[in-house]
Image (tube, grey):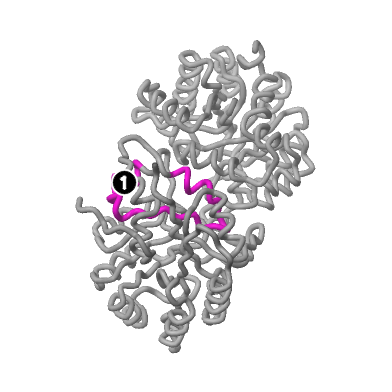
Amino acid sequence: MIVDGHIHLHSSDGQYDPAVAARCLHLADRAGIARMVYLFDLGAAPSVDPTGDEIRRSNDIGMELVARHPDRFAAFCYLNPSHDPAFSLAELDRCLAGGCTGIKLWISVHADDPRLDPIMERAAAMRLPVLHHAWYKATGFAYNESTPAEIAILARKHPAVPIVMAHLGGGGHRGVIDIEGCPNVVVDTSGAQPHAGLIEFAVDRLGPDRVVFGSDWPIRDFAVQRAKVDGARIDEATRQAILGGTMSRLLARAGSPEVAR
Amino acid sequence: MTAPRFDANAWAGTWPFGTGETSSLATTVAGLAGAGMAGGLVSPLRAVLAAEPSAANADLCHKAANLQQSGFTLRLAPVVDPSLADWPNQFAQANHGAGDALGAIRIVPNYHAYDLDHSGVDVLADTLAARSIPLIVQIRMLDERAHHPRMVIPPVPVRSVAALAQRHPALTIVASGIFFGELAAVRDARNAYVELSSVESGDTLPDVLRTIPPERVLLGTHTPIYVPHAALAKLGGEGITSSALDAIGGETARRLFQVQGATAPQAT
């Protein structure tokens, strides 16, 4: 079963839109993707520093996706660590009750900021995976965008939390090396162009169970992103681990529907 | 049955950034064939960072002449730097060296540090148009975010490609390495084609075809820098006819790059 660990939706009015979900499912089907992890909605929470209302609207969409398509979507609770921790933890509780199985952090706060601590401590207590954006950019760094080195600091501070570092294509070789010594961090394959040799490098340095497939749809194309993995020079067992095995285990650990399977 | 796929953007040599991908001409051809390509247009990577590209072109032409290939249609796109005073010699040597395998001339203005309004570009454009040789303008080699942090090379402004196309309506121009968000800048330049290796969106090909008609879109891999399978995965989508897919996947490139046996374009 192919699991895409990194997708968004882009609803035009910031509300759950069945047509947007249907388009996502249709394109995922075409690429052979069985299950997806929704992170946040680009229409509901477009800001780099989302407000509480934006966070709630985006998470409402995730919970609606899980309710309507429990076999196809998992959803992570999107949080902004600059908000009052009481709000963030209450929002996390609301989302967990609504079927969310992880936490998504983007670029509102750097990954090594102590304001992440209450969220990470709750993640550790509840065995929730945390997917955090990261990128090394020669140009165009945005707001409080984290580097993989900052992800490594976060990972060492919270070794009980399974962390998915987003964007192998963005962090590149340096990013892989940054997290090599952090066994609680896996990297997703999303980000930038389909650079040859990068997945092979990540597998070589991190091992076959620390690389997971992520497309970043609709910013990227499901089929193209899957083809990066299909075209990588890796053995078949590793390919299957990347395309779904490892992510399924992460989701199961957090109590997603795969537990019952 | 689909028409043979042809890669409009391939390279041979070493790219010194990233993983330092190295691909001899034989490896490039084998990699493309292994991914399902029946042919490809190849340029020498070494020319991108060379002070003068002729040696890299000559090496590629020599290797192409000695390549044992079976069932793969190889065309060459030597690199010319029209900002150098010796560019006519570069072109003459490349033309002679490639012989019948010459498919196009490629320029890399951003790495060779000139703009498309340089006078040499216009003379080269006239020279190529007179010989029905396409000009490939390499917009970028990599997403600028992924450049070496001390060696960021800005892309060629796509509006300058459109302006060049308008100044030389008899010239066939291919914008290679263009991004999805840049396509609109060449929409109205009817002699400008786009190559898909760096183009991506949520539903790539249908989204591209909302801006550029299928007869001006070319499959390209950017191998060995990119994974060729990713390019081939772009060839699909609702509402795209098999004839449009075949044109994008290879037929148009085979005609532009003067591959023997290429069919004439269909009236649309």
Displayed quadrant of residue A11 = top left
Chain label for disc 1:
B
Q: Residue at x 65, y 24 (%)?
A: A248
Horizontally, residue B147 falls left or right of residue A120, namely left
Rendering coords of residue B182 (x, y %): 36, 55
**Can you say whether A183 is above or below A61 in the image?**
below
Per the rendered image, the range of residues in magenta is B206-234
Callout 1 crowding tier (Cα within 10 Å): few <14, some 14–19, many ≥20: some
**Can you say whether A66 is above or below B98 in the image?**
above
Q: Residue furthest left?
A: B267
Q: For the N terminus of chain B, give its image quadrant.
A: top left
Q: Amino acid at mark 1?
A: Ala
Magenta residue check for A210? no
User: Toward the viewer: B172 or B41?
Assistant: B41
Provide the residue designation for mark 1: B244
User: Toward the viewer: A110 or A123?
Assistant: A123
How many numbered marks does the figure carry?
1
Element assignment for label 1 = helix
Q: Residue at x 71, y 38 (%)?
A: A154
Rendering coords of residue A165 (x, y %): 65, 38
Displayed quadrant of residue A145 = top right
Rendering coords of residue B33 (x, y %): 54, 53
Horizontally, residue A138 falls left or right of residue B259, namely right
Rendering coords of residue A138 (x, y %): 57, 58
Horizontally, residue B146 falls left or right of residue B158, namely right
Q: Residue at x 60, y 41 (%)?
A: A229
Q: Residue at x 58, y 18 (%)?
A: A90
User: Toward the viewer: A155 or B174?
Assistant: B174
**Can you say whether A17 is above or below B236 in the image?**
above
